Image (cartoon, helix red, strand yellow):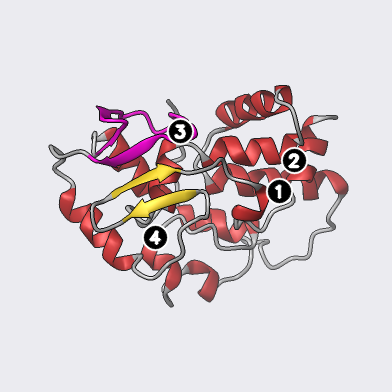
Amino acid sequence: MARYRGAVCKLCRREGMKLFLKGRRCLGDKCAMEKRAYPPGEHGKRRIKASEYRIQLREKQKVKRTYGLMEKQFHGYYELANRQKGITGENLLRVLETRFDNVIYRSGFATSRQEARQLVRHGGFIINGHRVNIPSYRLKLDDVFGINPKTKDQVRIDRAIEVNDGTAVPEWLEIDRKNISGKVRSLPERAHIDLNIQEQLIVELYSK
């Protein structure tokens, strides 16, 4: 599958907010948003008139880049959310939040979603006792996940837990960081998702 291979700090600057794509670096003074809080490129400091389409597009790009998705995959998630009952925007966020790589990140077992994706692909975690190495796998209610006893990434996971010590765990997850395990206690609601985005603008963009 295609994936973005460029400088991720430029993505944060383009969207005008921290997307926390580089883990610990995003929390320190070395974060690009702390040094250059304006879009990349020679015209980055120039004021650009924000049209309705531009605002909607930027909102979509924020979410897509936060979860590390390419356009085709993101659009597929939108179509899935649109077919479900309820509010399409909230359905979309719920689908994205229950991805395996995001659950590992939210649990504090990785310092970034990119690292979580690598750990999953390396077979570092199991779901309901079975090895799952598909980052896009969507967890369901009452699914139990934890570290694979055979993983070679124990050190990376331990380091991530140390870095994330004291950070809040989403209400929809039940986490035991000591034993590196967790459970989906409920499906995430919009109030449980701490993303500074307006998902309705994405729905409006795709509805045109």
Q: Where 189 sits versus 85, above or below?
A: below
Image position of 136 (left or right of 19): left
Mark closer to the chain start, 1 or 2: 1
Q: Secondary structure at mark 4?
A: helix
State the CA–CA distance, disc 3 to disc 1: 25 Å
Image position of 183 (left or right of 203): left
Q: Are marks 1 and 2 in contact (CB under 8 Å)?
A: yes
Span shown in magenta: 125-147
Residue 106, given in percent of the width and then of the height, sits at 44, 52
Seen at 87% across and 47% down, the residue is 52
Residue 183's image quarter?
A: top left
For disc 1, the marked residue is 59
For disc 2, the marked residue is 202
Q: Secondary structure at mark 2?
A: helix
State the CA–CA distance, disc 2 to disc 4: 26 Å
For disc 4, the marked residue is 23
For disc 3, the marked residue is 139
Give whichever of 205, 6 is nearer the camera. Answer: 205
The C terminus sits in image quarter:
top right
Mark closer to the chain start, 3 or 4: 4
Eye-nearest disc, 3 or 4: 3
State the CA–CA distance, disc 3 to disc 4: 23 Å
Residue 112, given in percent of the width and then of the height, sits at 40, 53
Mark closer to the chain start, 3 or 2: 3
Seen at 60% across and 54% down, the residue is 192
165 inside magenta stretch? no
* Residue type pointed to by label 2: Ile
